[in-house]
Image: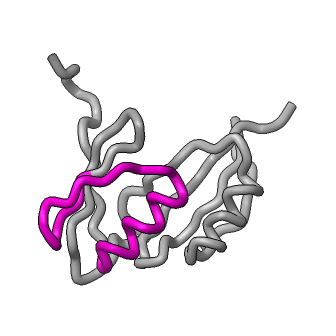
């Protein structure tokens, strides 16, 4: 039985299915299931979601998906190597540090990490 009142699925609009898939497979090792040319399901190892073909990327003012990392500096470089761009360099906030990036098809995400003690 699924628990109620928890996020159960995330769907990301993307403008290029193959480019988005290649980025997230390489960046986070997501596994994909193709459901035609306009929809891919994914699993990140604990959570399911999907990517649907869209004419425009999700707006930067919309919901922000934030990933966790043990090594922010490494992941800044990985984002760049995989064709993403850094939209906000690493910054501190109460409880950690994070950066924002735009994936190769134009959607903004963030990655956070704990402060090294």
Which residue sits furthest top?
1
The colour scheme applied to this rendered structure is one colour
Between 67 and 20, the one nearer to me in the picture = 20
- Is 73 placed above or below 58 here? above
Q: Position of residue 96 (x, y in %)?
A: 71, 41
Q: Position of residue 27 (x, y in %)?
A: 54, 58
Between 32 and 64, the one nearer to me in the picture = 32
- Is 5 placed above or below 52 here? above
Q: Quadrant of the C terminus?
A: top right
Residue at point 40% right, 43% down?
A: 44
Which residue sits furthest right?
117
| Residue 24 covered by magenta stretch | yes
Q: Across the whole image, how many numbered discs are drawn on residues?
A: 0
Q: Quadrant of residue 80?
A: bottom right
Q: Quadrant of residue 37?
A: bottom left
Q: Is residue 19 left or right of residue 92?
A: left
Q: Quadrant of the N terminus?
A: top left
Q: Is residue 85 left or right of residue 77?
A: left
Residue at point 30% right, 61% down?
A: 12
Q: Position of residue 49 (x, y in %)?
A: 28, 48
Q: Which residues are magenta?
A: 15-41
Q: Position of residue 108 (x, y in %)?
A: 47, 67
Residue at point 69% right, 40% down?
A: 70
Residue at point 30% right, 50% down?
A: 42
| Residue 66 covered by magenta stretch | no
């Amino acid at each position: 039985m699924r628990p109620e009142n928890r996020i159960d699925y995330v769907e990301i609009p993307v403008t290029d299915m193959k480019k988005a898939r290649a980025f997230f497979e390489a960046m986070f090792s997501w596994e994909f299931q193709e459901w035609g040319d306009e929809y891919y399901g994914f699993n990140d190892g604990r959570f399911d979601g999907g990517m649907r073909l869209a004419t425009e990327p999700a707006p930067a003012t919309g919901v922000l998906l934030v990933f966790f990392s043990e090594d922010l500096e490494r992941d800044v470089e990985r984002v760049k190597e995989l064709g993403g761009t850094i939209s906000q360099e690493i910054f501190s906030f109460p409880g950690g540090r994070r950066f924002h990036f735009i994936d190769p098809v134009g959607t903004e995400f963030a990655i956070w990490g704990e402060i090294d003690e």
